[in-house]
Amino acid sequence: MSADTDPYHEVQSEMQSTLASAGTLLSSFRRIQGMAPSRGRGEESEELSYARSELKATLSALEADLEDLEESVRVVETTGASFFGLNETEVQKRRKYVRDVRKELDDMRAEVASSEGFGSSSTSRYAPSSPTSRPKSTFVDPLQRPSNGKSNDEDVDEQTEWSRMEQQAAVQMIMREQDKTIDSITGTVVTLTEQAGLMGREIGEHIELLEDLGQNVDRTESKLNKSLKRIKRFVRETEGEFAFYIEAGDH
């Protein structure tokens, strides 16, 4: 089995593309999660929820590709590498690649799962924590200034800015999806237009051929009519001469 017909390479190429998309979505998810203001347990922004859904959908697609790839490796191992024109080194290389992708996929799934049910709070598993730290009291003194030295108005402005950035990121993501859809529709319309133009040219050529055929038929019919007239005239003249000879013979 050559590299051009080996389905492993085609599936691997698709999986690499999906894996790259998953990495990009995971980076965006982390960024949105880090920018989101602190919320209560179980609360999160729509942008963060949307980013999580997109990431989970991509991971599901990656899981499907990985299962196909794992199955192909199992078939090679069960049947024998030589049957497919492969050597043991190539089989080990494929087995290692599948294991590495499986580990990366499991890590991303675990990260997404660990973030579910929580808002963008400071309890993120990426935030450093001290072994001796204790949970802080949830009571807030309205007369006490925040420990970061910012006033309540400044906190509100900062949260507003975060919300604006989240909304802007979501809008940009939606616009990119719309652009992809528009490009796809445009390509389809262009293809249909080209096909319609080709059909129009072919129909025009057929019409010209039919017109030429009709003209040829008319010319042929005209020639046949002329020939028929000459034959009839010849017959009449011949009959007249034949009758003259008969009369002359009688005399």
Image: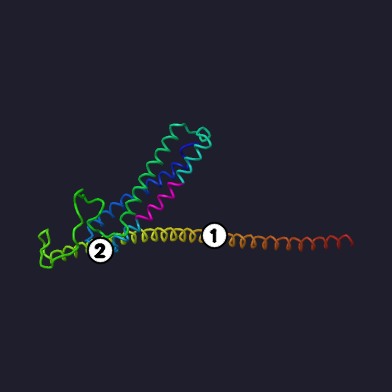
- The residue lying at 41 percent from left, 35 percent from top is 93
Indicate the amino acid at tag 2.
Gly
Could you classify mark 1 by the number of other residues whose Cα lies within 10 Å: few (under 14), some (14-19), or many (20 or more)? few
Residue at image position (43%, 48%) is: 65
Q: Nearer the viewer, residue 4 or 103?
A: 103
How many marks on residues?
2
Q: Which mark is residue 24?
A: none
Residue drawn at point x = 35 percent, y = 58 percent: 53
- Along the line of sight, the residue nearer the viewer: 9 or 139: 139
* Farthest-out residue, right: 250
Q: Residues within 10 Å of mark 2 (few under 14, many from 20)?
A: few
Q: Main secondary structure of the magenta part?
A: helix
Please tell me which residue lies in front, 133 or 250.
133
Relative placement, left or right, of 27 versus 59 is left
Q: Does the magenta-highlighted stretch encompass residue 180?
A: no
Q: Earlier in the sequence, mark 1 or mark 2?
A: 2
209 vs 109, nearest the viewer: 109
**Residue 16, horizontal then vertical, whole percent:** 37, 45
Q: Secondary structure at mark 1?
A: helix
Numbered range of the magenta stretch: 55-67
Residue at 52% x, 34% y is: 80
Q: CA distance from mark 1 to mark 2?
A: 74 Å
Q: How is the image coloured?
A: rainbow
Q: Marks 2 and 1: in contact by CB < 8 Å? A: no
Q: Is residue 14 left or right of residue 175?
A: right
**Is residue 95 rendered to the left or right of residue 31?**
right
Numbered label attached to residue 206: 1
Instruction: Determine whether 157 is above or below 97 in the image.
Output: below
Q: Looking at numbered disc 1 in the image, what kind of residue is underneath it?
A: His
Element carrying mark 2: loop
Q: Is residue 118 left or right of residue 102?
A: left
Query: Can you identify the residue that label 2 sits on?
Result: 40
